[in-house]
Image (cartoon, rainbow, N blue to C red):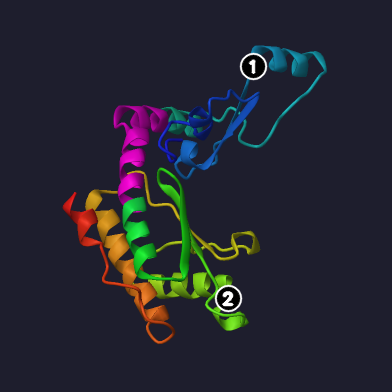
Amino acid sequence: MGRTGTMFAFERDGVVPDLLVLSKTLGAGLPLAAVMTTDKISQTADDRGFLFYTTHVNDPLPAMVGLKVIEVVERDGLAARAAELGDRLKRGLRALQQKYDCIGDVRGRGLLLGVEFEALDRGQRHSARALSNTVTDKALHVGLSANIVRTGACDGVMRIAPPLTATDADIDLGLQLLDAALEQTLGNLRPVRKAPALAVVGAQ
């Protein structure tokens, strides 16, 4: 909800899904999820006797929290803010890409971005996954929580998803800390390309 720069990610692709499942952001930490569909599909499910139940079905407390979350996301324009901050973050990450030759790509939408690392050699020690994991660990050491939950599917891509309530200063500080983590990781491996361009981010 709002993370990719629109209320829902599918809105940017010009499609309307048959089913939409929401969780996590909707509940703000409480056990709340929602499944939305068309009247036609809902009626078909009813006609065929489909029954969905769970411990918290129709629980009024998380339902009220969900309504408040929707109110706050709309009231504070968090989707538009995610798009704005995402552009700021992407510019900063691309500046790091110009500085460090191990960053092969920066991609994503809004405040859901990925930094793809490239292997420095053919050995496992400097593989894309090893670099991503090491930079993640160094970042945590210097105070930046990014890509802490890692799975094999991520391979050499660092997932960066700041809070929707982040500020410009938070984004700039995160970029500085990531720069420091990259410096610590790569300082003794390969020289950097050129001086960093992070000052441009903070000045805008």
Tell me the number on the disc at residue 127.
2
Magenta-drawn stretch, dominant element (helix, strand or loop): helix
Which label was assigned to residue 15? none
Q: CA distance from mark 1 to mark 2?
A: 46 Å
Q: Which residue is found at the position 36% from the left and 39% from the top?
A: 83
Horizontal and vertical percent position of residue 141: 38, 75
**Structural crowding at the residue carrying mark 2, measured as other residues with C-alpha within 10 Å and reported as few (<14), some (14–19) or many (≥20):** some
Residue type, numbered disc 1: Thr
Q: Nearer the viewer, residue 28 or 189?
A: 189
Please give the name of the residue rendered at 28% of the width and 66% of the height, measured from the top-left corner. Answer: 176
The span shown in magenta is 68-89
Residue type pointed to by label 2:
Ser
Give percent across and percent down for residue 31.
Answer: 55, 41
Q: Locate residue 109, reporting x and y percent.
A: 45, 43
Residue at the spot 19% in from the left edge and 49% down from the top edge = 204
Q: Is residue 183 visible?
A: yes
80 in the magenta segment: yes
**Quarter occupied by residue 93:** bottom left
Q: Earlier in the sequence, mark 1 or mark 2?
A: 1
The answer to whether mark 1 and mark 2 are in CB contact below 8 A is no
Q: Is residue 180 above or below residue 172?
A: below
